């Protein structure tokens, strides 16, 4: 039922209404009603019938009762009034009938033994307790006695009697030695239920200790010990040889005659036993005999009750718990040994003290109602029933015309207020009695509502719900329901009113929302209450988690999207395998999902998403299967052992949800590479046994690796080792080579054979060689390694080589010959008739004559050209003279050298190359590359300061590749797919700026810029103007995607800081000058402290990433020539004696010497700012 759990008073009211159907009223537990309504006494607590007390403590006899008004108490002792006031030791607890007998000031507890009964009385009746028999616990001392030694023949039976003193309650018996060591018991020696110690047969070792019976008394917690028995065993074998104890025929070994079993307890062949219903039945059979008999139990005509029967004391006792009538019958025990068997039959009779079939219950009626009290009990023999009223026999009570006694039933008709009383039913037989109190109360109470008023009940749409309206009244009121104040009673259709008054709505709909009123009515008046019902949307998981299969280590997400009533608080939780899920570091719980990172095997299981509100919940479950690497195979076994094969069998490990696809068998041998495992073979995942082919003379050890889609398992534990027998090698080493490491030797190498190809011990190699085509005798040597060096060989001579394997079992097959060569020497000759032909500005073709083969002195690898850039045709342009090379493999006569710099002077030399190195160099050839087209202009920038103009700026090309003749700019306006007419502009080589006047403020422009030489235009660079700006800030585009520094916030801040600092310095200088201070000035002209600040007019910086930086101080004229400044510095001026030069990587290696006047820089003759980059291109 989708609603909140009702409070406890609702259950009480529901029970009340059910009882009212039987013509009785139950007083609800509501305290306000309990305090207002009158009620006869009811006994609520009392002591047990057989009440045994500790004599060291005060005596407490309990009797508690309730009623309205509160009852008073008095007691009888031995059926006579017990006057508590006359005995100073006896008192009664406040608001209770419990007796307390205090012995702190003296007195004997035994004086108060007897039968007590409690009476609880108010003006509506009297209730009685059971007859409580008070007894004081007793633990009498053991009588003193002197026990003579017990003389017994070895093998004879023996009973040591305990006969403990009678105690109350009976003591617990156990046997120990006088030194407090427990007596070891077994099927030969054991204690009976009566406390005696039984020996089925006595052995000589039994007199090694004495035997004392001990009694432990419960209340006093004392143990009393009887004087010990000592045994004297007469034997035919006086030596107690401990080795005979484990002899298979111990008795005959000791000369003890074997005997058939006989019963020590009970005596004879039959006995009987009576037990009360509900108690435990204990049957016992203890037998003597040699060897010690075994005991077995049976029931005549049936089986032992397996659910209640258990064997004790080494099968000598049978206990049946909670005995019932069907456990009566004949049981027999069978004692047997190898000499024979005997049987004892026990007839079991089950009797019963009275037990309730129908215990009388309190009867609450309205005036004029009918009712009945029923008192039914059973027992064996059949119990008798006696009725009493208010503690007096019913026969002696005043007559009541509204009351009729019919055996075990009292019938009440048309009850009135005067009919109130407490009735006692006493049923008894010879085994005990039962006493029950039941009162009859007559009430007249107008209807009352028991639940809080104007409750709010929230329910889920389409659920079944029930509205409770607990009430009370006498006579029992009738209840009706109404909705929203409507006059019609709610019953039928979607509504159902139960007999207890609850209203059930079978399926809640939105229109069922509203206020419901329940009205309770009887002849004394009416009462009503209201319940407000709100209908909420159900909580539903509309996107459920799905079953998933994931590999270990991956990430899994389980979705759980929920729709719920927005007025209710939603809680989403997760269960794993129906237990709350702990969200650890690897898990992330969100409102609509659960993510598991790095899935592990322990994450496998069922995951349940629980979406709940305070009214309902919805569940969705998915199963996560984790695919893991398989577990390692185990239990490797080698069978079918043969000279060249063996069968390997293994047990597969768990595949961890991913089927095993392959098994890899590996082996390890302990001679050549111990501890190193090699793959032997591979088998399908469906097999677990394979025949392995083996090589001779290998001490094998195997292991198996399982493979599935996730990965490989750990290797199995190794198998046992198996060594195969030896044989001559069946193959020779491979990869045989002969190569010279020096000009006068030849090193012969080969790949050594492994353990599986050695085939025997002491593997070695027979190495043979001779010069090819000379037919001379073979040279040979035996080698244990994998190389041999032949010395004193001619330069680069071919040899025939053979390497043959050999072990202690013989030689391998005859090997094939391999051709090798002795060492090489440097070539003796250089290529001749080297001719150079310039193909274009970046490539040349070469042609030469081959050298004679005998001058190569080795294997001709290649012809090689060394070339370097001597200078550039552009004046004063520094170039790197680093040598470069071009290779022409094989015996070739021509080749092409490309990727040269245009407009440059080059030098070239050629050599022959063999395996040893380069030969001598040819004569040096010089050539000049023609002018080429320039590279693309650098740092092409497009700025748009406003909507009317676009500023273009660029830098000279990195490689002019000739004399620059100018720049070509092509630009076109475009707007989406519309393209305007292309405009072409040509500029001088010194011009690096241009401004375009916009004719259309909306369109963008595409600019293409290239540099020109006399050969033609070079590579072009393209940029577009920025999109029309949304703010006034001008934008710019860079060829290298660099931002305009002038627009950077940090730069603006830096400039402001510098300006402020300069201003402060000027103020300080002005103050010093005004005070007449002196400060140093330069003796010469103002000379910059460093390079000119390369800051552009618009505040941006240019950065050069060139390797070849020109000298400062030159500028380019319009005709492409250089106008020298007054300073004629050159790099030579900084060297000593003009000998400064560059090494191969272009770095200057001369020492700098400072010339005083060379650092001074005069004013420029051009209005254009001098740039260190522009200077390079002005050298043309």
Image (tube, grey):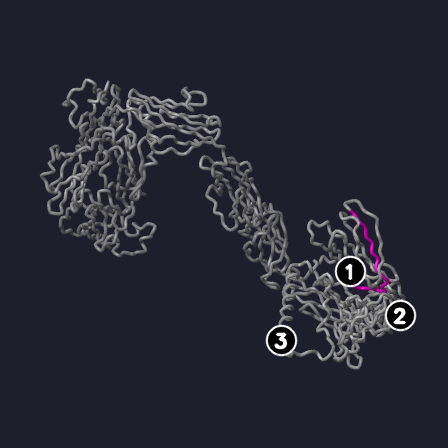
Farthest bottom residue in view: 1137
Q: Nearer the viewer, residue 143 or 1178?
A: 1178
Q: Residue at x 43, y 23 (%)?
A: 495
Q: Nearer the viewer, mark 3 or mark 1?
A: 3
Disc 2, SS: strand
Q: CA distance from mark 1 to mark 2?
A: 44 Å
Q: Is residue 194 above or below residue 885?
A: above
Query: Which x, y percent locates residue 301?
Result: 32, 30
Residue bearing the label numbered 1? 954
Within the image, what quadrant is residue 323 found in?
A: top left
Q: Residue at x 73, y 57 (%)?
A: 1038
Q: Is residue 196 left or right of residue 765?
A: left
Q: Position of residue 199 (x, y in %)?
A: 25, 47
Which of the two discs, 1 and 2, sits closer to the camera?
Answer: 1
Name of the residue lying farthest toward the front: 1074
Which range is magenta? 955-974
Q: Is residue 972 magenta?
A: yes
Callout 3 touching callout 1 (CB < 8 Å) = no
Q: Position of residue 89 (x, y in %)?
A: 12, 43
Report which residue position mark 2 lands on.
834
> Who comes first in sequence, dot 1 or dot 2?
2
Asked if 569 appears above or below 644 in the picture, the reply is: above
Q: CA distance from mark 2 to mark 3?
A: 77 Å
Pick whichever of labels 3 and 1 is earlier in the sequence: 1
Disc marking residue 1072:
3
């Amino acid at each position: 039922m989708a609603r909140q759990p009702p409070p406890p008073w609702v259950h009480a009211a529901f029970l009340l209404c059910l009882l009212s159907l039987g013509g009785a009223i139950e007083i609800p537990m509501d305290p306000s009603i309990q305090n207002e309504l009158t009620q006869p006494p009811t006994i609520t607590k009392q002591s047990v019938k057989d009440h045994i007390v500790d004599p060291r403590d005060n005596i407490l006899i309990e009797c508690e009762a309730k009623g309205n008004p509160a009852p008073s108490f008095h007691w009888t002792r031995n059926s006579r009034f017990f006057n508590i006031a006359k005995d100073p030791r006896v008192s009664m607890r406040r608001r209770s009938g419990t007796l307390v007998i205090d012995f702190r000031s003296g007195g004997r507890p035994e004086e108060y033994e007897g039968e007590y009964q409690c009476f609880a009385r108010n003006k509506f009746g009297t209730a009685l307790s059971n007859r409580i028999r008070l007894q004081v616990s007793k633990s009498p001392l053991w009588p003193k006695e002197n026990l003579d030694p017990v003389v017994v023949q070895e093998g004879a039976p023996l009973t040591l009697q305990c006969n403990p003193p009678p105690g109350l309650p009976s003591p617990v018996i156990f046997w120990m030695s006088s030194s407090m060591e427990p007596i070891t018991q077994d099927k030969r020696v054991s204690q009976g239920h009566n406390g005696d110690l039984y020996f089925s047969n006595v052995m000589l070792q039994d007199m090694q200790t004495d035997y004392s019976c001990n009694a432990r008394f419960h209340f006093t917690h004392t143990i009393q010990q009887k004087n010990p028995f000592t045994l004297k065993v007469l034997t035919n074998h006086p030596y107690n040889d401990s080795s005979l104890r484990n002899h298979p025929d111990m008795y005959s070994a000791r000369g003890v005659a074997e005997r058939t079993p006989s019963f020590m307890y009970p005596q004879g062949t039959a006995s009987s036993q009576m037990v009360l219903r509900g108690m435990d039945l204990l049957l016992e059979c203890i037998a003597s005999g040699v060897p010690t008999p075994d005991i077995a139990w049976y029931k005549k005509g049936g089986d032992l009750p397996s659910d209640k029967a258990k064997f004790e004391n080494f099968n000598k006792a049978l206990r049946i718990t909670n005995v019932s009538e069907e456990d009566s019958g004949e049981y027999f025990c069978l004692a047997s040994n190898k000499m024979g068997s005997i049987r004892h039959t026990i007839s079991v009779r089950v009797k019963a003290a009275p037990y309730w079939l129908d215990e009388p219950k309190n009867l609450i009626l309205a005036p004029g109602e009918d009712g009945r009290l029923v008192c039914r009990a059973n027992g064996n023999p059949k119990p008798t029933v006696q009725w009493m009223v208010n503690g007096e026999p019913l026969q002696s009570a005043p007559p009541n015309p509204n009351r009729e006694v019919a055996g075990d039933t009292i019938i009440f008709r048309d009850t009135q207020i005067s009919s109130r009383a407490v009735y006692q039913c006493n049923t008894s037989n010879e085994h005990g009695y039962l006493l029950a109190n039941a009162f009859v109360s007559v009430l007249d109470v107008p209807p009352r509502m028991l639940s809080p008023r104007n409750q709010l009940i929230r329910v889920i749409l389409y659920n079944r719900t029930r509205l409770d309206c607990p009430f009370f009244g006498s006579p029992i009121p009738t209840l009706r329901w109404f909705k929203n104040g409507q006059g019609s009673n709610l019953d039928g259709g979607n509504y159902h009113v139960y007999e207890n008054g609850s209203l059930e709505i079978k399926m809640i709909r939105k229109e069922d929302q509203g206020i419901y009123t329940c009205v309770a009515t009887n002849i004394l008046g009416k009462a009503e209450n209201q319940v407000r019902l709100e209908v909420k949307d159900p909580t539903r998981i509309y996107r459920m988690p799905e079953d998933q299969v994931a590999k270990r280590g991956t990430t899994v997400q389980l979705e759980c999207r929920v729709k719920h009533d927005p007025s209710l608080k939603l809680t989403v939780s997760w269960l794993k395998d129906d237990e709350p899920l702990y969200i650890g570091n690897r898990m992330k719980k969100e409102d609509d999902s659960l993510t598991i990172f790095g899935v592990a095997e322990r994450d496998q299981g069922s995951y349940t998403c629980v979406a709940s509100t305070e009214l309902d919940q919805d569940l969705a479950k998915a199963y996560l299967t984790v695919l893991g690497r398989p577990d390692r195979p185990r239990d490797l076994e080698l069978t079918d052992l043969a000279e060249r094969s063996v069968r390997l069998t293994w047990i597969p490990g768990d595949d961890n949800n991913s089927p095993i696809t392959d098994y890899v068998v590996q082996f390890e041998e302990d001679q050549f590479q111990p501890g190193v495992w090699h793959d032997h073979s591979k088998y399908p995942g469906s097999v677990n046994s394979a025949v392995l082919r083996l090589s001779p003379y290998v001490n094998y050890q195997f292991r198996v690796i399982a493979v599935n889609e996730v990965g490989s398992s750990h290797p199995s534990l190794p198998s046992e080792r198996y060594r195969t027998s030896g044989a001559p090698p069946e193959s020779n080493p491979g990869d045989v080579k002969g190569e010279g490491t020096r000009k006068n030797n030849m090193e012969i190498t080969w790949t050594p054979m492994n353990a599986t190809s050695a085939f025997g011990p002491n593997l070695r190699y027979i190495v043979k060689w001779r010069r090819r085509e000379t037919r001379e005798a073979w040279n040979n040597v035996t080698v244990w390694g994998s190389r041999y060096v032949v010395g004193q060989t001619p330069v680069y001579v071919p040899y025939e080589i053979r390497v043959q394997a050999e072990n202690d079992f013989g030689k391998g097959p005859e090997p094939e010959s391999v051709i090798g060569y002795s060492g090489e020497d440097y070539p003796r000759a250089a290529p001749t008739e080297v001719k150079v032909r310039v193909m274009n500005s970046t490539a040349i073709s070469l042609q030469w004559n081959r050298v004679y083969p005998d001058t190569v002195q080795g294997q001709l690898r290649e012809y090689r050209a060394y070339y370097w850039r001597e200078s550039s045709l552009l004046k004063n342009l520094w170039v790197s003279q680093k040598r470069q090379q071009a290779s022409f493999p094989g015996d070739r006569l021509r080749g092409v050298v490309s990727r040269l710099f245009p407009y440059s002077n080059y030098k070239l030399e050629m050599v022959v190359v063999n395996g040893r190195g380069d030969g001598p160099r040819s004569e040096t050839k010089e050539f000049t590359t023609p002018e080429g087209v320039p590279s693309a202009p650098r740092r092409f920038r497009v700025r748009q300061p406003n909507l009317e103009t676009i500023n273009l700026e660029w830098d000279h090309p990195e490689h002019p590749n000739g004399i620059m003749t100018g720049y070509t700019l092509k630009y076109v306006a475009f707007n989406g797919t519309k393209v305007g007419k292309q405009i072409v502009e040509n500029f001088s080589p010194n011009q690096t700026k241009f401004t375009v006047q916009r004719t259309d403020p909306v369109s963008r422009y595409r600019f293409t810029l290239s540099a020109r030489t006399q050969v033609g235009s070079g590579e072009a660079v393209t940029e577009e103007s920025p999109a029309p700006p949304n703010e006034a800030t001008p934008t710019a585009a860079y060829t290298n995607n660099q931002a305009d520094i002038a627009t950077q916030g940090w730069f603006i801040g830096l400039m402001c800081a510098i300006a402020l600092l300069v201003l402060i310095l000027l103020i300080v200088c002005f103050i010093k000058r005004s005070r007449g201070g002196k400060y140093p000035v330069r003796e010469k002209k103002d000379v910059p402290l460093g390079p000119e600040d390369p800051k552009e007019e618009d505040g941006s910086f240019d950065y050069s990433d060139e390797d070849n930086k020109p000298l400062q101080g030159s500028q380019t004229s319009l005709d492409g020539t250089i106008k020298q400044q007054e300073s004629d510095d050159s790099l030579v001026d900084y060297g000593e004696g003009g000998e400064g030069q560059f090494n191969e990587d272009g770095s200057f290696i001369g020492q700098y010497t400072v010339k005083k006047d060379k650092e001074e820089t005069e004013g420029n003759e051009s209005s254009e700012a001098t740039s260190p980059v522009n200077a390079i291109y002005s050298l043309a």
